[in-house]
Amino acid sequence: MPDFETWNEQRGGEIIAAHVQEEGAALPMLHALQEAFGYIPRAAVPMVASALNVSRAEVHGIVSFYHDFREAPPGAHVLKLCRAEACQSMGGDAIAAAAIRQLQIGWAETTPDGQITLEPVFCLGLCACAPAAMLDGKVVGRLDSTRLSTLLENVRQA
Amino acid sequence: MSLISEIDFGTPVSDAETTVTVTIDGFAVTVPEGTSIMRAAMEAGIQVPKLCATDSVNAFGSCRLCLVEIEGRAGTPASCTTPAGDGMVVKTQTGRLKKLRRDVMELYISDHPLDCLTCAANGDCELQDMAGAVGLREVRYGQEGANHFDAAKDQSNPYFTFDPAKCIVCSRCVRACEEVQGTFALTIDGRGFASHVAAGMDEPFLASECVSCGACVQACPTATLIEKSVIEIGQPEHSVVTTCAYCGVGCSFKAEMRGEEVVRMVPYKDGAANHGHSCVKGRFAWGYTNHRDRILKPMIRERISDPWREVSWDEAVGRVASEFKRIQATRGRSSIGAITSSRCTNEETYLVQKLVRAVFGNNNTDTCARVCHSPTGYGLSKTFGTSAGTQNFDSVDDADVILVIGANPTDAHPVFASRMKKRLREGAKLIVIDPRRTDLVRSAHIKADYHLPLLPGTNVAMLNALAHVVVTEGLVNEKFVRDQCDGDAFADWAAFVARPENSPEAASHFTGVPAETIRAAARLYATGGNAAIYYGLGVTEHSQGTTTVMAIANLAMATGNIGREGVGVNPLRGQNNVQGACDMGSFPHELPGYRHISDEIVRGLFEKDWGVHLDAEPGLRIPNMLDAALDGSFQGLYVQGEDIVQSDPDSKHVIAGLQAMECVVVQDLFLNETSNYAHVFLPGSTFLEKDGTFTNAERRINRVRKVMAPKGGMADWEITLAIAKAMGVPMHYSHPSEIMDEIARLTPSFSGVNYAKLDALGSVQWPCNDAAPEGTPTMHIGKFVRGKGNFLITEFVPTDEKIGPRFPLLLTTGRILSQYNVGAQTRRTGNATWHGEDLLEIHPHDAEERGLHDGSWVRLESRSGATSLRAHITDRVAPGIVYTTFHHPDTQANVVTSDYSDWATNCPEYKVTAVQVAPSNGPTAWQTEYQAHSHESRRIAHPAPLPAAE
């Protein structure tokens, strides 16, 4: 499971510095920050802006544009359920409803125990194995509600 | 009078030279290649409906209202993003387009409040106009669906509100902030239906990077971004084009009025200096014009410890005349003088110097340019032959390398800075020579290729080193020098700069900048294409200010960067009319047009026209007047619109001089620091209350137009006339245009200027005469005004103001965006929100050594005096350097500055003072004592009301 670091400015600065020379550095930088901290801390936005010599409004525009970038820390585990057309046609809606029922949270919310965050995603490129999901960065295909329950039980106990 | 409504062409102009002809709705239109169909249509007077397009920003193609049909092409392309092609046949109105547009409008209106009648933009709303234009009659979707009506309004900015409930997310504000202003403070947050305009990281506007220039408000098609004054007052009913009274950029504005009340100031697109852009000062900070502190009645008092007494104009002017005559009778003709104002009009300045020369009978006239750009006038006249910058602002669009020295345009000349930044974003290279890391060194999308953070006071060493590289590395433009410059002068100069003591290696010892950086910057300047130098008071306000100006001129001549677009030497002048005040003969040694008073022929010209005898001896400069006051020989001073106590160096000396005078007359909008020592106060008028002209940093003569009656009863020029009359020498003018006619008659560089021409052309740049009837945008084309360009030897002499154990830090002073000069105007506006006090910038290292925290009170002490203010810890300044502004009288930064000055012109050395900084717990004894007197001096004893019968 992803073990996110807690935000600290020095570490954030190192991550930013590691990508600053890349062409089109903003997205790689933001991905790296999210990988480390689980989200894009608000305090990191002006640092990214300064490193790229752009305004913090511009960086905020990028972060808020992409659903994948989180503005708050996620739970210990992140379940992304595909909501795109192919998965919907293969029963994705029922799985989504089951997940919401089981976790008792809405989209982009985290269970009160801080264990699981549920996020929608639009196509994981796994249409042949629809309905698909991604749990802590690993893709899961041919999902049904039983399998979903098992997956969630397993990560909770891990 | 009616409301001036400017045409919005929808997309920017194309500067292509080839043209295309397109047929739009049956009319053939010929436009430059690259022009959008939308713009081409508007050129033919055909308005294509639009929402997301406006001609200040590039086409975006998001609103889908401007769709057109093109013969032979499928679909309905957007006319804003589709360039007009030769032979194209376009239809802007068809049944299909009408339906599409109505559908689009329906969607917009389904998420827009229908409160038009109570909306502040009612009557000035493009959404409303477009609903009418497309014939919207129903909204099938209703308004009950998802909408943004509950979005909270942001009122944090003092001047405008942001109401996202009314926003159509056209991005015009975001694009204006980026393309026009160059601040990039706005963005679109989120995507899809959640998209909304956000300042910074979705912060309140005030907390964001927003600099309140107003470009977004200007661009907004709805009431989303709207001036608070419009919300309060309502829509204007007429407008008058006039010129901003703040900095030397000289932006043209429409004063939009309801009767005599200003509703808002809107930047004017046809303004040649600003092309429709503005900054927070000109756009919004005009509230001082009707501030309750304004003095509207003349006042007199016997002693400076007395309260003021309101009197009639006759009594006040009579007092001035009788006192001045009495002083001259007892102390001689030279015992009185005047200071002209760089904030008043050319005509008013001209009159004050005429009053001195023709009525006082001496040449004791000086001006605040003494303390800012006097070295520019002197230095450029000795090298090029003209006391002014060589270009217009538009020239920056053709610059490939921009060298900024001792100037901070993003704060002090913000509208020009936006132009410069636009050019830099297009790829021009940038060299910044400044002790501080200004915004030009590094800010969003701007990065100096070389920043040379020199020690204050070493400009000449730096420029000589740059010149050394040019000469010794074979980078001189020999053809230019041979054809246009004085060969002997060049040879002497080249030999001088080539000496080892002028090498970058030697200079690095004084400047603290590595030799390699200096060499690289010099190579870039000399070989990077069109290279333009822009400079400010960081050049002139030094003991070697004039030398620095000459060194700049030398560098430009040696590299051939003079006499065409994109190059030149450009002083960024501080006050709105400081160029004009100098042009108008404000200096004691010069008649209008920079002609020496000792020149018999010139003097004869004025003597004949004025019917008086003129003194051939130059008069006293401001510092000399103050010295003469202390020895008793100078006893009467007329100060028009200048606050020398706050703005001039060594405040204690200024005050002592004023205190020694028998009659000090201050003419101003407000009781100021100088009026604390005055005996007569004459209420001045603002730029809104009179006609006249201002001359900006590009030598551009712009009209100032009256939009209301003078609140004190008289315009400034009328007050000067009243004094002349009371002194027994009446002058006869019924309108400032007649004064300009006299200026034109007597001044060759102005001979073609008159109000009719200014009204017709909008503005002209002097010289404007028979040779150049429409003015001169670029000077010295093919030939210098003085004949051959003159190279002058510029030996570096370190200032006498040196750091030592007692005063180990160097203080340099500057400006901040939201405040202007002594702050008399801006402090009395919402701009105080951004800058409520002067702060001392100090490097973290120096702060730590002294145990200072951000916001700590510190005592700032020099050999001249001490003051207290709060510290701001920042690495914008290098270790060993501290920086502050002088906008606030509570701080009185000039108590600290020394009385060292430029060798040639007496321009004070504001930019270098050795100081010590120590923790403090409050104001110094001087501040307390001064505040007490200042407070006393603001008392006004109102006379008992007269009996009703009288």
Image (cartoon, coloured by chain):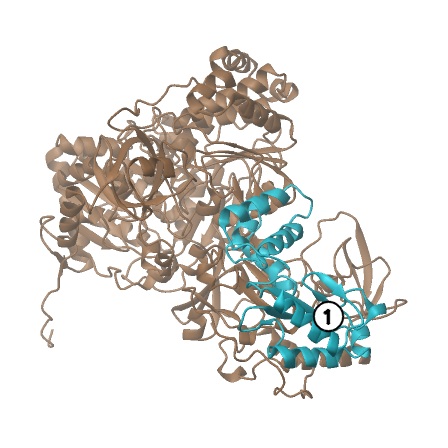
Secondary structure under tag 1 reads loop
Q: Position of residue B423 (x, y in %)?
A: 61, 44
Quadrant of the image occupied by residue B864: top left
Q: Is residue B301 above or below residue B448?
A: below
Pick whichever, B758 or B68, lies toward us.
Answer: B68
Label 1 resides on the chain identified as B
Percent position (x, y) of residue B473? 61, 16
Can residue B195 be seen here? no
Colour of chain B as rendered:
brown
Above or below, B633 against B258 in this view is: above
Which of the 4 quarters of the picture holds residue B589?
top left
Residue at image x 54%, y 46%?
A13
Q: What's under tag 1, amino acid-wise?
A: Cys
Q: Is residue B797 visible?
A: yes
Please tell me whether residue B628 is drawn above or below residue B107 in the rendered image: above
Most extreme residue toward the front, as rendered?
Answer: A157
From the viewer's perspective, tell me whether residue B262 is left or right of residue A16. left
Residue B892 appears at what percent x and percent y?
A: 25, 44
Q: In the rendering, at what x and y percent does residue B539 appear?
A: 42, 32
Identified at 58% across, 56% down, the residue is A4
Residue at image x 67%, y 88%?
B138
At label 1, counting other C-alpha atoms closer than 10 Å, the crowd grade (few under 14, some 14-19, many 20 or more) is many
The correct choice, above or below, for B498 with respect to B55 in the image is above
Q: What color was chain A assigned in the picture?
A: cyan
Q: Is residue B169 left or right of residue B372?
A: right
Q: Which residue is mark 1?
A: B66
Left or right placement of residue B874 versus residue B520 in this view: left
Please tell me which residue lies in front, B76 or B681: B76
Judge by depth and name the residue closer to the eye, B88 or B757.
Answer: B88
In the image, taking residue B399 as reference, residue B610 lies left or right, namely left
Please report the residue visible at 57 percent of the width from the left and 47 percent of the height from the top: B419
Q: Quadrant of the C terminus of chain B?
A: bottom left
